[in-house]
């Protein structure tokens, strides 16, 4: 359970960074940021696998680059469903997804699957 909360917090941090870095992404408040992170997690768990399966031929033709569009669509969909989180277009959504992904990658170096901070060994 703690791992799920930590992942949602990391996603919220990534979305907050995206609002600072990517033009066209804005959030109205901390509550909207938390709701966007939770909704993005739900969308990634339910909708994203279906979209990946349906777009598999296009993903194979583009050698996987179409997954950027699918991931951007997840953020764009969350912004359409949530009033306090706005993304101006697909390119801004793809940029936001890249920031969220990089934030998750950096956080995964320090946090294990169970949500505990782990020591880095040489």
Image (cartoon, grey):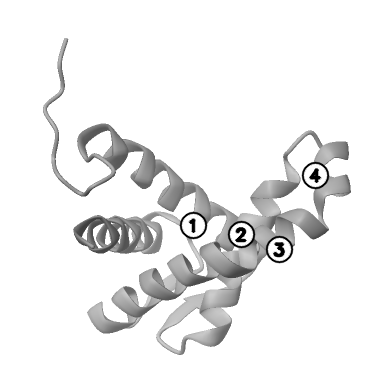
| 83 or 108: nearer the viewer | 108
> How far apart are the alpha carbons under marks 2 and 3?
15 Å
Q: Which mark is residue 72?
A: 2
In the image, taking residue 23 as reference, residue 57 lies left or right, namely right
Eyeballing the image, is 29 above or below 90?
below
Q: Which mark is residue 6?
A: none
Work out which residue is located at the far bottom of the displayed protein and give it: 83
Where residue 86 sits: x, y (%)? 49, 78
Residue under the image location 61 percent in, 56 percent down? 71
Q: Secondary structure at mark 3?
A: helix
Earlier in the chain: of badge 4 and badge 2, it is 4
Q: Quadrant of residue 33?
A: bottom left
> What residue is pinned by disc 4?
59
Earlier in the chain: of badge 4 and badge 3, it is 3
Query: Pointer 2 and pointer 1: residues touching (CB < 8 Å)?
Result: yes
In the image, taking residue 87 as reference, residue 117 lies left or right, namely left
> How far apart are the alpha carbons under marks 1 and 3?
21 Å
């Amino acid at each position: 359970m703690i791992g799920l909360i930590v992942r949602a917090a990391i996603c919220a941090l990534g979305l907050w960074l995206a609002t600072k870095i990517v033009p066209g992404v804005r959030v109205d408040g901390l509550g909207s940021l938390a709701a966007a992170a939770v909704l993005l997690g739900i969308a990634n768990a339910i909708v994203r696998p279906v979209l990946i399966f349906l777009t598999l031929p296009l993903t194979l033709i583009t050698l996987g680059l179409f997954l950027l569009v699918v991931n951007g669509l997840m953020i764009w969909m969350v912004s359409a469903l949530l009033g306090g989180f706005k993304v101006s277009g697909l390119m801004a959504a793809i940029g936001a997804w890249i920031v969220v992904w990089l934030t998750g990658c950096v956080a995964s170096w320090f946090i294990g699957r169970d949500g505990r901070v782990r020591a880095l060994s040489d």
